[in-house]
């Protein structure tokens, strides 16, 4: 049997997983700090259009990624101001962020429909990249793929090994206690929210720069929500989120290959797979209520207002 | 010993919207002195302490530390000065280890290096055993308090603030804590000891400052005072003991628990094991115990919020009710007063008439064919407000707008006016001003006098001795047998609270 | 002088109603700045958006047609949101409801009988309920987060629709367009005003508003919904059953969305097409909040939101502005609303508190 399909399949999984990795890891930090930002979808799509617009007008992939991160961060800033300083409901504000992001991206993207971008440059090390199978996979990716892995490692290390990470976990666990010991719950949460926004922005940027290097309205197609589900699935652990994202990447590409292999199922049913998989995964992970609650940050979704 | 006070506060004033929490408060603590800050709930003690520890700023006033005027900007600044604080509601993180908790509460420089070893050293030195690797949620309340104390001690404090430290401890644990505090005092550490427990203050403190309604009303030397004289200073008028009235307590059994076992539905909760209890018409039975020993779970199974599988384990008027829900039990004449007023016993942002509807809908017939009879509900709430002297402009105002004491009077009144045959009250006077507390106790006594069976679960031993005919103790989900209150001593109850068997506890006199 | 946020002794009832007005004003002001930046005359743009569409009888009729699904779904969602049950998959429930109702119309495409329409509407409600029942089952049985499941099911529903119009339900006599047969006349909702598209669906929406008001303001079920949302422990103390309310709110909101979907088909479109709703299910979330989660408020909010759709269309036609402006409008409105809602529980004070001054004197 020929292995010709393996390398392209693995490469597709990586491209499908990378935006989820960014968004999920960012949201993990946000939720660890006790904040539930349901606006990931909105931050991703705004990152996608900001990055694509920048790429088209400057031609620079690096600038485009920075723009994507910055756009996501700006949207997260709105969320932070509303939920942290004005005490608005986190669920409602997150939904608003998504609706606003989808609308604004469509408005900005109006003039970019049909434009193209060459895509992010891929690493090419003569000798290494040409090694069969592992060559293109390990040494032939674009910079964001490597960044996504490094990012997961850094976040995992930060959360479990540094004082900063301890603080993030502390405000997520018991914001009143953190406040009475003398930490600024608002500042720590704001930092986490902004980080999450930037990560979602980069995730979106990856979609419009590498996954399909063009702009299509609503091109995130629910990936922001899947990233949210991944955070729960991963029990708020960065590396588990990473593997979860790759699992989903794998499911996403089944549809591409099933059709290629002549499986007689309508395209629509294959396209349902990632969404159905998300539901199933959520059921499995939340079935044990006590265990699910043990892993979740105790203050998740609760607003904090210092009295006096 | 020098003459410079370690800490001196002059004319501190702090106001919240509508409330003057501290008005012109002055206070002086010498090195090595154990200084009591005495006052009722709401007297302004916590506000003052938050100011000293840098959690809140005052509107005006001065603070001197070792003779120098300073302003403490944050708890971190307070810790750098040498001020340590043990909070009443512990500032701990359940899902983290002891070591992580301590690291969070000390300066980053101190947290570096071999923190676990230093924790062990200090805890051994002061007789406060702690394992740095344990998760907080696996620890008892007493152990949790040790974390806070050790956290302070690691920073070599010059002033240690303890906010109501004994409310969660057994009498024996209190003795251990006092040993540690006296030792620290001997080493020159000043201690600001906040409490409303007069006997403790007499036993421990060198000086006392007494606050009432945000103001300092007296300074005194506890050793020269009686508990009664300090109580009078604290409350402003002489104490009224509730009238017990004539109760026989030999009526028929109204509430009966037989081999009641129930797993806790809470994370880190306490399972109930083999509880037996009878409450008769016309008697008040008190259940003592340290928080977290199954009181919440007991309340839940008694109210029907958590049904038990054995219907027979709970009987009301000799009918099995274990599987019935709250409304069915209410229909049979059960009154219920949960511990938490806002959020459990009442909906904070709902009006008083809606909160009346919450528990009285069935028994007072406020719902017809599913439709709410707003007129009937309003009238009922108004009658509760009038009969129980609840201070509020009207029943359309929200529960959250009432003071703690007034809301508690409303909640108790709402249950009592349904004329219950059985009433179960958890911490009925917790966080309530003395006046309201006294009237609530009197109402419970009167209710028993009218032939109801009253079960009161409380951490306040003085309260239980004041009103109970019989007292039982709950510890780790098990209940000791209820004994006539006059045959029991504080020591006995303390031992039972700590889990010593009834036979052993009975030998202490 | 400095500004402080201070908790009110009790929530301000005035601000509950004033806050949406503040939000609308702020949205319009921001939109004008946005138009200015885009190089469009702000006054004219606002006029095109908010006045032009309703300056004729036909325009007002269109407003009600667009508001019908928004009001229906908004009322349904408001119950769930009050109970902290976050159904954000109304778009999917609308779609499945439309497919159920539309499926009936297709099954009887040759038979014109009086009961066809009622049958379709019932099927629409049932379809929406069935789709809403899935997150309800998963939440009550497996404790699964309804936000994520209801949303994922929306994507699934849209794919089901796509499959049906591209496959089995495609009009056999059509020119291979992804569209179903046209419904027969008995499957269409009667028009209320000649020459307009205003139909009986609008009356159904008004009926749902009235019924919703009775339920939430006068019925014990509505009271239970409010209590469980504000204080879950108090609800359990009162003996209200949480799971039952989860089921109930998801079934109500699913049913309303399904009804809205069928009304869209049998009132306005007349056949099954690949895009039944331009996101009514999501916009209704904003409608519910803007309407203060109260049926009567939802009615007004639904009309306002319908206006942004019409305004988007007219701005596109007369000023060549992209249609996406509507989405930005809606998102901004929700942001400003959430921001001004802070005034319900808090007030802003300048300088030191007044009590302090009194005390100092």
Image (tube, rainbow, N blue to C red):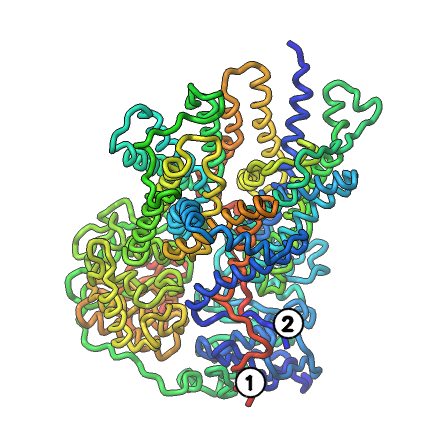
User: C201 or B192: which is nearer to us?
Assistant: C201
User: A110 or B135: which is nearer to us?
Assistant: A110
Could you tell me which chain the residue with mark 2 belongs to?
A: B
Q: CA distance from mark 1 to mark 2?
A: 31 Å
Please give the name of the residue rendered at 31% of the width and 58% of the height, measured from the top-left corner: C217
Query: Around disc 2, counting alpha carbons within 10 Å, would you say few (fewer than 14), some (14 to 19), or many (20 or more)?
Result: many
Query: Around disc 1, counting alpha carbons within 10 Å, would you say few (fewer than 14), some (14 to 19), or many (20 or more)?
Result: few
Q: Position of residue A243 (x, y in %)?
A: 61, 33
Instruction: Establish if C187 lies above or below A77.
Output: above
User: B137 or C42: which is nearer to us?
Assistant: C42
Could you tell me which chain the residue with mark 1 belongs to?
A: C
Please give the name of the residue rendered at 65% of the width and 26% of the height, measured from the top-left corner: A12
Please give the name of the residue rendered at 41% of the width and 83% of the height, measured from the top-left corner: B235
Q: Position of residue A10 (x, y in %)?
A: 66, 24
Quadrant location of the N terminus of chain A in the rendered image: top right
Q: Is residue A198 left or right of residue B451?
A: right
User: B369 or C284: which is nearer to us?
Assistant: C284
Instruction: Establish if A8 lies above or below C325.
Output: above
Q: Can see residue B292?
A: yes
Residue where numbered disc 1 is placed: C357
Residue where numbered disc 2 is placed: B83
Quadrant location of the C terminus of chain A in the rendered image: bottom right
Q: Is residue B288 left or right of residue B136?
A: left
Q: Is residue C88 left or right of residue A130?
A: left
Secondary structure found at label 1 = helix
Q: Is residue B274 left or right of residue A131?
A: left
Q: Position of residue C255 (x, y in %)?
A: 35, 41
Instruction: Establish if C67 lies above or below A137.
Output: below
Quadrant in which residue A9 is drawn: top right
């Amino acid at each position: 049997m020929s292995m010709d399909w393996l390398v392209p399949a693995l490469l597709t999984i990586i491209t499908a997983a990378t935006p989820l990795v960014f968004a999920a890891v960012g949201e993990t930090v946000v939720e660890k700090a006790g904040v539930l930002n349901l606006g990931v979808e909105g931050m991703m799509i705004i990152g996608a259009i900001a990055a694509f617009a920048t790429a088209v007008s400057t031609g620079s992939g690096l600038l485009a990624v920075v723009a994507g991160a910055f756009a996501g961060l700006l949207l997260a800033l709105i969320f932070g101001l509303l939920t942290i300083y004005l005490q608005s409901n986190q669920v409602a504000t997150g939904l608003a962020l998504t609706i606003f992001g989808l609308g604004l991206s469509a408005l900005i993207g109006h003039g970019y429909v049909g434009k193209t971008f060459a895509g992010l440059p891929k690493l090419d090390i003569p000798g290494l990249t040409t090694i069969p199978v592992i060559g293109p996979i390990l040494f032939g990716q674009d910079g964001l793929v490597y960044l996504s892995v490094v990012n997961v490692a850094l976040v995992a290390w930060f959360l479990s090994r540094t004082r900063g990470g301890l603080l993030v976990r502390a405000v997520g666990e018991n914001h009143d206690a953190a406040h009475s010991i003398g930490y600024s719950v608002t500042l720590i949460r704001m930092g986490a929210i902004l980080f999450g926004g930037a990560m979602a922005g980069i995730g979106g940027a990856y979609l419009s720069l590498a996954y399909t290097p063009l702009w299509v309205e609503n091109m995130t197609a629910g990936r922001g929500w899947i990233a949210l589900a991944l955070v729960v699935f991963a029990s708020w652990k960065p590396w588990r989120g990473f593997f979860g994202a790759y699992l989903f990447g794998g499911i996403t590409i089944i549809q591409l290959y099933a059709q290629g292999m002549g499986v007689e199922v309508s395209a629509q049913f294959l396209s349902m797979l990632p969404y159905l998989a998300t539901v199933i995964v959520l059921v499995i992970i939340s079935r044990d209520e006590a265990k699910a609650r043990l892993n979740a940050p105790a203050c998740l979704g609760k607003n904090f207002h210092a009295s006096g | 010993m020098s003459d410079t006070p370690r800490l001196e506060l002059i004319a501190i004033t702090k106001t919240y919207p509508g409330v003057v929490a501290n008005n012109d408060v002055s206070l002086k603590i010498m090195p090595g002195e154990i200084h009591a800050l005495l006052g009722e709930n709401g007297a302004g003690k916590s506000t003052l302490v938050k100011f000293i520890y840098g959690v809140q700023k005052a509107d005006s006033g001065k603070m001197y530390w070792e003779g120098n005027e300073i302003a403490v900007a944050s708890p971190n600044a307070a810790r750098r000065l040498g001020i340590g604080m043990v909070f009443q509601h512990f500032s701990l993180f359940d899902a983290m280890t002891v070591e992580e908790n301590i690291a969070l509460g000390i300066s980053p420089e101190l947290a570096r290096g071999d923190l676990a070893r230093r924790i062990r050293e200090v805890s051994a030195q002061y007789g406060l055993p702690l394992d740095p690797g344990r998760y907080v949620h696996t620890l008892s309340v007493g152990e949790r308090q040790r974390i806070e104390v050790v956290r302070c001690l690691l920073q070599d404090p010059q002033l240690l603030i303890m906010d109501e430290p004994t409310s969660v401890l057994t009498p024996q644990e209190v003795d251990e804590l006092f040993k540690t505090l006296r030792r620290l005092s001997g080493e020159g550490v000043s201690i600001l000891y906040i409490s409303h427990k007069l006997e403790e203050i007499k036993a421990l403190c060198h000086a006392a400052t007494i606050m009432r309604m945000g103001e300092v009303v007296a300074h005194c030397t506890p050793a020269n005072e009686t508990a009664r004289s300090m109580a009078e200073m604290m409350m402003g008028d002489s104490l009224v003991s509730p009238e017990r009235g004539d109760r026989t307590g030999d009526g028929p059994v109204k509430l009966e628990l037989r081999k009641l076992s129930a797993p806790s539905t809470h994370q880190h909760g306490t399972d109930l094991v083999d509880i037996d209890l009878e409450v008769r018409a016309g008697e008040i039975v008190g259940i003592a115990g340290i928080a977290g020993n199954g009181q919440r779970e007991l309340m839940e199974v008694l109210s029907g919020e958590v049904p038990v599988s054995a219907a027979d384990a709970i009987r009301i008027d000799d009918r099995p009710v274990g599987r019935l829900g709250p409304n069915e039990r209410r229909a049979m004449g059960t009154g219920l007063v949960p511990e938490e007023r806002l959020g459990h016993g009442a909906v904070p942002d709902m009006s008083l008439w809606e909160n009346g509807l919450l528990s009285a809908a069935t028994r007072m017939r406020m719902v017809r064919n599913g439709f709410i009879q707003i007129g009937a509900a309003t009238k009922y709430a108004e009658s509760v407000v009038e009969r129980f002297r609840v201070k509020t402009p009207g029943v359309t105002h929200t529960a959250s707008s009432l003071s703690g004491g007034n809301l508690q009077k409303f909640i108790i009144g709402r249950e009592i006016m349904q004329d219950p045959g059985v009433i179960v009250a958890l911490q009925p006077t917790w966080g309530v001003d003395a006046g309201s507390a006294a009237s609530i106790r009197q109402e419970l006594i009167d209710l028993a006098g009218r032939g109801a069976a009253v079960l009161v679960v409380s951490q306040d031993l003085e309260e239980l001795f004041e009103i109970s005919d019989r007292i039982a103790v709950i510890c780790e989900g098990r209940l000791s047998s209820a004994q006539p209150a006059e045959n029991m001593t504080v020591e006995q109850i303390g031992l039972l609270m700590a889990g010593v068997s009834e036979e052993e506890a009975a030998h202490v006199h | 002088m400095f500004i402080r946020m201070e908790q009110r002794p009790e929530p301000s009832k005035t601000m509950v109603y004033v806050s949406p007005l503040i939000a609308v004003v702020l949205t319009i002001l921001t939109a004008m700045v946005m138009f200015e930046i885009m190089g469009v005359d702000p006054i004219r743009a606002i006029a095109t958006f908010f006045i032009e569409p309703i300056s004729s009888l036909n325009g007002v009729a269109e407003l009600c047609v667009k508001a019908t699904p928004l009001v229906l779904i908004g009322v349904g969602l408001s119950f769930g949101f009050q109970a902290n049950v976050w159904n954000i998959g109304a778009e999917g429930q609308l779609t499945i409801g439309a497919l159920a109702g539309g499926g009936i119309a297709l099954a009887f495409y040759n038979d014109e009988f009086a009961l066809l329409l009622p049958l379709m509407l019932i099927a629409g409600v049932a379809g929406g309920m069935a789709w809403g029942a899935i997150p309800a089952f998963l939440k009550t049985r497996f404790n699964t987060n309804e936000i994520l499941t209801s949303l994922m099911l929306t994507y699934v529903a849209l794919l089901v629709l796509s499959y049906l119009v591209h496959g089995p339900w495609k009009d056999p006599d059509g020119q291979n367009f992804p569209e179903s047969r046209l419904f027969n006349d008995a499957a269409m909702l009667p028009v209320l005003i000649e020459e307009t598209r205003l139909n009986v669906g609008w009356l159904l929406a008004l009926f749902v508003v009235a019924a919703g008001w009775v339920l939430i303001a006068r019925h014990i079920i509505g009271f239970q919904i409010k209590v469980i949302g504000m204080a879950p422990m108090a609800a359990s103390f009162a003996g209200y059953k949480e799971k039952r309310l989860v089921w109930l709110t998801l079934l109500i909101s699913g049913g309303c969305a399904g009804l809205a979907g069928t009304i869209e088909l049998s009132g306005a479109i007349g056949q099954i097409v690949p895009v039944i709703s331009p996101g009514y299910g999501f916009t209704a979330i904003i409608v519910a909040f803007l309407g203060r989660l109260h049926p009567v408020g939802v009615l007004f909010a639904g009309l306002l939101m319908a206006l942004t759709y019409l305004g988007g269309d007219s701005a596109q036609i007369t000023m060549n502005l992209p249609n996406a402006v509507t989405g930005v409008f809606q998102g901004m409105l929700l942001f400003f609303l959430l921001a001004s809602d802070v005034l319900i529980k808090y007030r802003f004070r300048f300088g030191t508190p007044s009590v302090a001054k009194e005390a100092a004197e």
